[in-house]
Image (cartoon, rainbow, N blue to C red):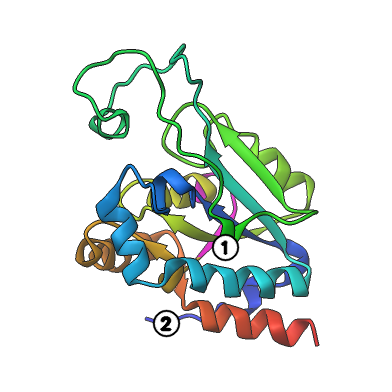
């Protein structure tokens, strides 16, 4: 079943969230090279860039969520296989992975909000994101970035649990492998978020800014 997402996208009550689009995740120096390859194959960065321009022009909020762990590893339990892969080692030795800044093509602009978290796997966990969204009157979160495997799905669920409506532009998210990401969107994400294309969302925002 398809839904008309236009009523959900009033710019004054909408925020575009760019999730973990960092150099160490999807950039040239990615510590997750197969995920970065999937993002390139799906034109993730240029697709999000178009949506960012439309959001700013329409007056929708723009938010970034990034990982910024302590480099000395204090307080980082290294308790998942993903964390071990990011550290490039097979033990729980100190030293959190440095995932770098937001990729240059999607760099934050004045007025955008960047939230960082040291712990957890999803956008709302100890990041302050919820307070920023509530205090700016956001009702709908348009969720972009990586990965559909964990962070995008988990953040969508967290947002819904907090009373937000979530819209996911299917060509502005990526996962590893790409065929799994498509299945996750079809069978998991669509049950908690409304799916659309970036072009459909851009059209709504462009119309509102004319």
Please identify, in this view, whether the residue under mark 1 or under mark 2 is nearer the observer. Answer: 1
Which image quarter is the C terminus in? bottom right
Reply above or below: 69 against 166.
Answer: above
Does the magenta portion include 161?
A: yes
Residue drawn where x is 53% and y is 54% of the image: 103
Residue drawn where x is 63% and y is 71% of the image: 8
Q: Residues within 10 Å of mark 1 (few under 14, many from 20)?
A: few
Q: Which mark is residue 105?
A: 1
- Across and down, in percent, residue 1 comes to 37, 81
Q: Residues within 10 Å of mark 2 (few under 14, many from 20)?
A: few
Does the magenta portion include 124?
A: no
**Extreme front residue here?**
28
Helix, strand or loop at label 2? It is: loop
Which residues fall within the magenta stretch? 160-167
Reply above or below: 118 against 180.
Answer: above
Residue drawn where x is 51% and y is 27% of the image: 118
- Across and down, in percent, residue 30 comes to 36, 47
Relative to 73, 105 lies left or right: right
What's the CA distance linking mark 1 and mark 2?
A: 32 Å
Query: In this orientation, does residue 4 appear?
Result: no
Helix, strand or loop at label 1? It is: helix
The residue that mark 2 highlights is 2
């Amino acid at each position: 079943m398809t839904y008309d997402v236009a009523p959900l996208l009033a710019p004054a009550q909408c925020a575009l969230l760019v999730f973990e689009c960092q150099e160490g995740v999807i950039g040239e120096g990615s510590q997750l090279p197969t995920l970065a390859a999937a993002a390139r194959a799906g034109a993730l960065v240029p697709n999000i860039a178009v949506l960012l321009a439309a959001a700013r022009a329409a007056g929708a909020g723009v938010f970034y969520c990034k990982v910024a762990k302590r480099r000395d590893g204090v307080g980082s339990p290294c308790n998942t296989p993903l964390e071990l892969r990011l550290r490039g080692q097979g033990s729980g030795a100190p030293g959190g992975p440095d995932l770098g800044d937001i990729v240059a093509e999607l760099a934050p602009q004045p007025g955008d909000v960047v939230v960082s978290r040291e712990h957890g796997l999803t956008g709302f966990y100890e990041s302050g994101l919820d307070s920023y969204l509530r205090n700016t009157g956001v009702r709908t979160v348009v969720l972009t970035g990586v990965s559909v495997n964990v962070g995008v799905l988990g953040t969508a669920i967290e947002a819904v649990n907090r009373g937000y409506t979530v819209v996911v532009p299917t060509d502005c998210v990526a996962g590893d492998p790409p065929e799994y990401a498509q299945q996750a969107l079809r069978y998991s994400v669509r049950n908690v978020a409304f799916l659309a294309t970036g072009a459909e969302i851009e059209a709504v925002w462009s119309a509102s800014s004319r």
